[in-house]
């Protein structure tokens, strides 16, 4: 097999979109993915009770204990980092919530004196948001006054269910702004018209019920990998990358363990890391020379630092009437950024995005937040409690901006090893006082809105431990090599043919789910990569 022009590590959203763009331009692209294709042979029904679901689709890598995973210790964190290692990455299990960052999210240092400004602003990324939404068939509504004018999602938003309408009226009654939620869920009949997804028209929804049978969830294994492979990209699954191969200041390729346990090497002209905010940092730290022990591309000492996990709170309202709370798509019905920007009178900086979603089916009521802290879900009152809540509940998920701290970090843990012999990961993360005050304020307002909508019971979870899907910030981008790992396009300052296209490059986290910005960033970086390299 010939050496590729471009070697991509990781086949998730960033890796899939990058592979599709580069292969379409005629580059020889090869992607190594440590997991496999997801197995949808046992789909999850939203109203079914199947205890096997959580064993088939576990979110915690150590609980999953798959050959695709590396050991991950989070004893020093109140939030468990979550991920799905396989083709499609964590989009296989995401709820398809689609949120652009606000213009102010790119300049929090200038506006609020915290974090760091991004080396570019919203307007530069806006065309790539629009392009990503077209490629993924996003359903949403343009015109949100929180944003400047720009492109619109190609499909209308998913219709508000009863609980969505109730909450909209409650927010209106208080003068609190809201907007219909956007989702990477699109009508099944539109699949054939999407640029990359040929398989989507006949594809099931996957591991979580984020739509109806008439819709398709745009996870990267469905939305981009079929088209990337048709364009000539190659994909090797079960390939666990151990380290980067470096010489004379450049990346020659990688060393990896294949599905049969053999150690192999793959060389390439250019290497692009898309292994998420933990996996990318792990690989860089494991690839340095033993004399320096700093890892690769780490003259700044920033690799692994400034990990951001989006502390999440949740509030569930229970209504006397049926409110469609078990059959609605699990993405956001509507969102509110009314309290998003800094108000000095609140005692904290920055804010949070509220996303309204159904409380889900029977399993969600037993195993998902905030039900897990409610003793009433088991015991003698189990049946009555389930009858009272199933279909009668709605939930606000409150995603808070996570300010970067160099002490929140990813470290190698040589005490444990993956199947390739590589070190595990230890996450060291602390929620600061600003974050706790921020979430407490937003949770109180969200509970108030549920009561205003008619909920007779409100359950809340001030900090959801099993919520760390959003892995950002461990290889920060910037203009100055002394304080950043990559330039604004994702090229490593220290290793010019090594690039990072995932969310580890983000200087700050915003308070929004990262998929939309991750997709836009991958497209932007891929376009610049093509313009800069001489092929």
Image: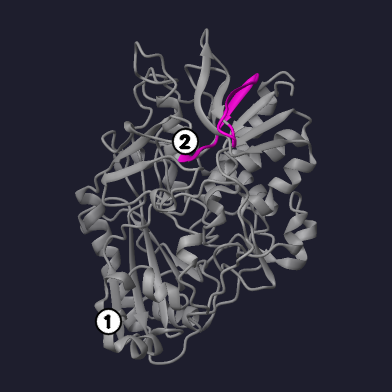
Of marks 2 and 1, which one's residue comes earlier in the chain? Answer: 1
Which residue is labeled 2 in the image? 419
Residue 309 seen: yes
Position of residue 113 relative to residue 226, above or below, is above
Magenta stretch encompasses residue 275 = yes
> Is 246 placed left or right of 445 in the picture?
right
Q: Indicate the quadrant where residue 274 lies.
A: top right
Question: Toward the viewer: 302 or 371?
Answer: 371
Please give the name of the residue rendered at 75% of the width and 56% of the height, measured from the top-left corner.
199
Direction from residue 33 to residue 297 in the image, left or right: left
Q: According to the image, label 1 marks what residue?
A: 376
Viewer-proximal residue among 365 and 153: 365
513 horizontally vs 429: left or right: right
Query: From the viewer's perspective, is residue 399 above or below residue 109?
Result: below
Q: In which image quadrant can residue 26 be found?
A: top right
Q: CA distance from mark 2 to mark 1?
A: 42 Å
Q: Secondary structure at mark 2?
A: loop
Residue that sits furthest to the top in the current view:
248
**Residue 479 picture location, percent across and down:** 45, 24
**Which of the colour schemes (rainbow, by chain, secondary structure, one colour) is used?**
one colour
In the displayed structure, does residue 469 sit left or right of residue 137?
A: left
Image quadrant in which the N terminus is located: top right
Image spot of residue 296 (x, y percent): 44, 20
Give the residues drawn in magenta, as a range: 258-276
Vertical side of 386 occupied by 363: above or below: above
Residue at horizontal 52%, vertical 51%? 90
Binning the other alpha carbons within 10 Å of mark 2 as few (below 14), some (14 to 19) or many (20 upward) gives some
């Amino acid at each position: 097999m010939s050496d590729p022009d471009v070697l991509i590590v990781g086949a998730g959203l960033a890796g899939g979109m990058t592979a599709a763009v580069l292969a379409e331009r005629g580059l020889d692209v090869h992607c190594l993915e440590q997991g496999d294709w997801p197995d949808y042979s046992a789909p999850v029904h939203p109203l079914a009770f199947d205890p096997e679901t959580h064993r088939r689709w576990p979110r915690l890598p150590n609980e999953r204990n798959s050959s695709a995973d590396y050991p991950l210790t989070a004893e020093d964190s109140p939030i468990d980092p979550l991920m799905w290692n396989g083709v499609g990455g964590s989009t296989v299990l995401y709820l398809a919530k689609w949120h652009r960052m606000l213009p102010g999210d790119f300049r929090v240092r200038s506006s609020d004196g915290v974090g760091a400004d991004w080396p570019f602003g919203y307007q530069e990324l806006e065309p790539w948001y629009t392009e990503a939404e077209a490629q993924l068939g996003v359903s949403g509504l343009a015109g949100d006054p929180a944003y400047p004018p720009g492109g619109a999602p190609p499909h209308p938003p998913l219709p508000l269910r009863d609980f969505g309408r109730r909450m909209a009226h409650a927010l209106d009654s208080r003068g609190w702004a809201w907007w219909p939620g956007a989702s990477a869920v699109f009508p099944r009949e539109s699949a054939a018209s999407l640029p990359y997804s040929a398989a989507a028209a006949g594809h099931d929804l996957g591991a979580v019920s984020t739509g109806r049978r008439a819709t398709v969830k745009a996870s990267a294994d469905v939305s981009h990998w079929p088209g990337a492979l048709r364009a000539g990209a190659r994909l090797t699954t079960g390939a666990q990358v151990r380290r980067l191969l470096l010489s004379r200041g450049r990346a020659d390729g990688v060393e990896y363990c294949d599905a049969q346990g053999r150690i192999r090497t793959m060389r390439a002209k250019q290497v692009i890391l898309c292994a998420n905010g933990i996996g990318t940092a792990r690989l860089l730290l494991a690839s340095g020379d033993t004399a320096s022990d700093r890892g690769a591309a780490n003259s700044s000492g920033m690799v692994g630092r400034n990990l951001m996990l989006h502390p999440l709170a949740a509030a569930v309202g229970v209504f006397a009437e049926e409110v469609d709370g078990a059959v609605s798509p699990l993405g956001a019905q509507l969102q509110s950024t009314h309290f998003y920007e800094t108000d000095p009178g609140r005692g904290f900086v920055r804010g949070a995005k509220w996303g309204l979603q159904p409380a889900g089916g029977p399993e969600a009521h037993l195993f998902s937040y905030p039900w897990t802290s409610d003793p009433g879900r088991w015991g003698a009152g189990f049946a009555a409690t389930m009858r009272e809540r199933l279909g009668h509940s709605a939930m606000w998920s409150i995603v808070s901006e996570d300010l970067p701290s160099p002490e929140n970090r990813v470290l190698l843990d040589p005490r444990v090893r993956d199947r390739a012999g590589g070190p595990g990961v230890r996450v060291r993360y602390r929620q600061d006082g600003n974050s706790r005050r921020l979430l407490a304020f937003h949770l109180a307002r969200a509970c108030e809105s549920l009561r205003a909508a008619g909920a007779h019971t409100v359950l809340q979870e001030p900090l959801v431990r099993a919520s760390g899907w959003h892995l950002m910030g461990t290889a920060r981008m910037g203009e100055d090599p002394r304080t950043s790992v990559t330039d604004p396009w994702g090229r490593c300052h220290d290793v010019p043919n090594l690039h990072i296209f995932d969310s580890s490059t983000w200087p700050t986290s915003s308070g929004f789910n990262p998929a939309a910005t991750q997709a836009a960033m991958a497209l932007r970086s891929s376009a610049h990569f093509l313009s800069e390299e001489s092929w």
